[in-house]
Structures are given as C-alpha cells and as structure tokens.
Image: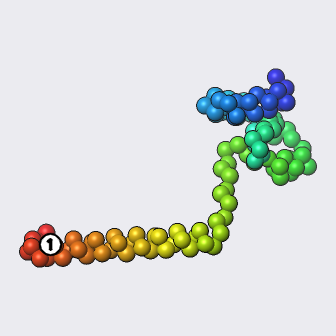
C-alpha cells in the first residue's frame, strides 16, 4: 500500500469507525509509520525517520501527531470568573457543612 491510500483509509476510519481507526493506527505505528492529523481530520502518513528536514517542519506546522491531544481554547474572562465564583461558593458551603457536623458532635457530647 502506498502512503496516500493509507491516509485515505485513516480519514475514512476516523470519520466512520473510530474503534477500527485506533487499532489501525496502532498497527501502522508498530510497522514504523508516523501518522499526523490536522484539525479537519485529514491524515498524513510518513515513513518514520525517512522524511527530509524541510518537509518534516512543514508537516508539523499543518498536522498534529495523532497521539497528542488538541489543547482546548482559552476561555474568556467572564467564563473564568463565573467558574472561580462557583468554586468559591461550593468551598464555602462545604466548610459550613463541616462546621455544622462538628457542632452536632459537640452538642451531643459524642467523643471520637
């Protein structure tokens, strides 16, 4: 099989049959291939170690290595502030609940 047909096969598997895609990627990686995928889900397959330096730099700009996860977009200030406030409120509620628990134990005279 040539590299273009492998790329097309991985594109199809990635879109329709993800479990077979994972197995096929593992199989190709064990055979010595490097698999890159861009944000659109288009793959590029190269032989490991036999790619020229300039084409390697170009492929790393456009494609991401298939095992690496894509970093999530940074949230804006309002979303981060809302999450921080929610965490603070939840922490305060937990603290109040713990204090109530300790007070009930103290009030009933129970010992640990």
Where residue 72 appears, as percent x and y from the top left, is 65, 57
Q: Name the residue: 68% across, 60% down.
A: 73
Residue 23 appears anywhere in the view: no
Locate residue 57 relative to residue 111 in the image: left or right.
right
**Residue 49 location, x and y as percent?**
81, 40
Q: For residue 3, which quarter of the picture?
A: top right
Residue in the picture at 86% in, 41% down: 51
Badge 1 marks a residue whose secondary structure is helix
Instruction: Check disc 1 and report the residue beneath it.
Output: 105
The one nearer the camera, 77 or 63, is: 77
Work out whether 76 lies above or below 53: below
Location of the N terminus by quadrant is top right
What residue do we see at 15% from left, 72% from top?
105
Question: Could you tell me which residue is drawn at 74 percent across and 30 percent down?
Answer: 12
Q: Which residue occupies the foreground of this view, 65 or 21?
A: 21
Location of residue 35 with respect to 1 vertically, above or below: below
> Residue 67: x and y, percent?
67, 44
Q: Quadrant of residue 26?
A: top right
> From the viewer's perspective, is residue 54 above or below residue 35?
below
Which quadrant holds residue 10? top right
Residue 102 is left or right of residue 17, and the answer is left
The image shows a total of numbered marks equal to 1
The residue nearer to you, when weighing 47 against 24, is 24
| Residue neighbourhood size for the residue with mark 1, other residues' Cα within 10 Å, grouped as few (<14), some (14–19), many (≥20) | few
Q: Please say whether residue 100 is visible from this viewpoint.
A: yes
Q: Is residue 30 left or right of residue 6?
A: left
Q: Quadrant of the C terminus?
A: bottom left
Q: Residue furthest left?
A: 109
Q: Colour scheme in the image?
A: rainbow
């Amino acid at each position: 099989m040539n590299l273009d047909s492998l790329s097309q096969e991985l594109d199809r598997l990635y879109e329709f049959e993800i479990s077979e895609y994972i197995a096929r990627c593992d199989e190709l990686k064990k055979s010595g291939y490097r698999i890159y995928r861009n944000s659109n889900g288009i793959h590029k397959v190269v032989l490991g170690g036999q790619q020229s330096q300039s084409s390697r730099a170009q492929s790393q700009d456009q494609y991401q290595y298939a095992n690496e996860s894509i970093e999530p977009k940074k949230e804006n200030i309002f979303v981060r502030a809302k999450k921080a406030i929610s965490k603070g409120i939840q922490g305060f509620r937990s603290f109040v609940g713990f204090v109530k628990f300790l007070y009930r134990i103290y009030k009933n005279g129970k010992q640990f």
